[in-house]
Amino acid sequence: MSLTKRKIEECLSELGNELVLRGQRIDIFIVGGTALALVHSFRDRAGDIDYAIRREYRDAFADLLSGYAIFDNHSAYLEQMTGDADHEVHFFHYRLFGNEGTQTGLNVWLAKDELQLASILLRLNSPHNTAKIDRDTNDAFHLCGELGITSAEDLKNLWGPYKNKFRADPDAPIDSEVFDYNLTDDYLEGCWQSIETLATRKEKSLKPETPKKGLPAHRRPHKKTLQGG
């Protein structure tokens, strides 16, 4: 299935409206292609909605999702980054799909560019990631431009804070095969070579892209603004 920004927001709105009827509010943390498609012009669609929910809301949200096959649960994988103390470090608030007056509905947070790139690195240079390697390399190329990353050393510095943050998901055994949770310098240098090769093929420099229309500046996920180019 291919989800455009409009389709994604329609789905989130449906879930938010149902939560309003139940008098509930749930925070959802979205990563991957969905988060990119909502805020970046280089991705216009996603295949599914990768999300995480805090442990205390998982049963309620699972009940809400009955009939929705487009959601992929990454709660265990991202658990250390969605806690009360850490979530604003790794995610930014997108919007509440629901009732602002009663503050009920689905409260959506999107992964910041740093987290997005770190999660791509887990699989970018993996020999098992053949199906999505072109898409992942393209996403990594654009995210490096957004974040001002211009060398393998920059990539290593970005990875450092995430080194012990990700956890294998016991319900997603393919993650254990595809994802490498202990990225070595050699692995990261290989990732950078893949990104540089794509840049050469595209004959493009690493630079920020134009923000997606309608997203206020304070909601932009990246921290750095590059000058020129």
Image (spheres, rainbow, N blue to C red):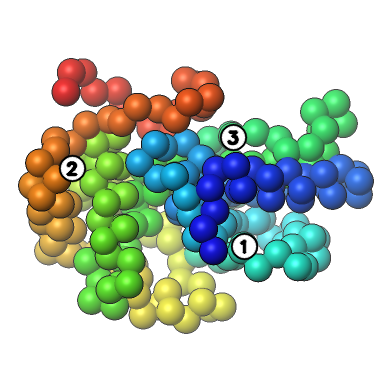
Q: On the rendered structure, is 229 left or right of 116?
A: left
Question: How many angstroms separate mark 1 from mark 3 (CA)?
Answer: 18 Å
Mark 1, Cα crowd under 10 Å, few <14 / some 14-19 / many 20+, is few
Q: Secondary structure at mark 2?
A: helix
Residue lying at 60% horizontally and 48% vertically, measured from the top left: 8
Task: Kindly identify the amino acid type of the residue bearing the numbered disc 3.
Answer: Tyr
Which class describes the residues within 10 Å of circle 2: few (<14), some (14-19), or many (20+)?
A: some
Q: Quadrant of residue 101?
A: top right
Where in the figure is residue 188, as x and y percent of width and height? 18, 58
Label 3 and label 2: CA atoms lie apart by 27 Å
Could you tell me which secondary element the residue under label 3 belongs to? Answer: strand
Chain-order first, disc 3 or disc 2: 3
Check disc 3 and report the residue beneath it.
94
Query: Residue sitting at 56 percent across and 57 percent down?
Result: 49
Between disc 1 and disc 3, whose residue precedes?
A: 1
In the rendered structure, the answer to whether residue 115 lies left or right of residue 55 reads: left
Q: Which mark is residue 81?
A: none
Up-down relation of residue 161 to residue 225 (above or below): below
Q: Nearer the viewer, mark 3 or mark 2?
A: 3
Q: Which of pointers 2 and 1 indicates the residue nearer the eye? A: 1
The residue indicated by pointer 1 is: 71
Which of the two labelled residues, at mark 2 and mark 1, occupies the earlier sequence position?
A: 1
x, y percent for residue 135: 31, 58
Residue in the foreground of this view, choosing between 171 and 4: 4
Position in image of residue 128 (x %, y %) = 29, 78
**Disc 2: which residue:** 154
Residue type at mark 1? Answer: Phe
For the C terminus, give its image quadrant.
top left
Residue 81 location (% of width, % of height): 51, 51
Question: Label 2 amino acid?
Answer: Asp
Tell me what residue is drawn at x 82 percent, y 38 percent.
Answer: 104
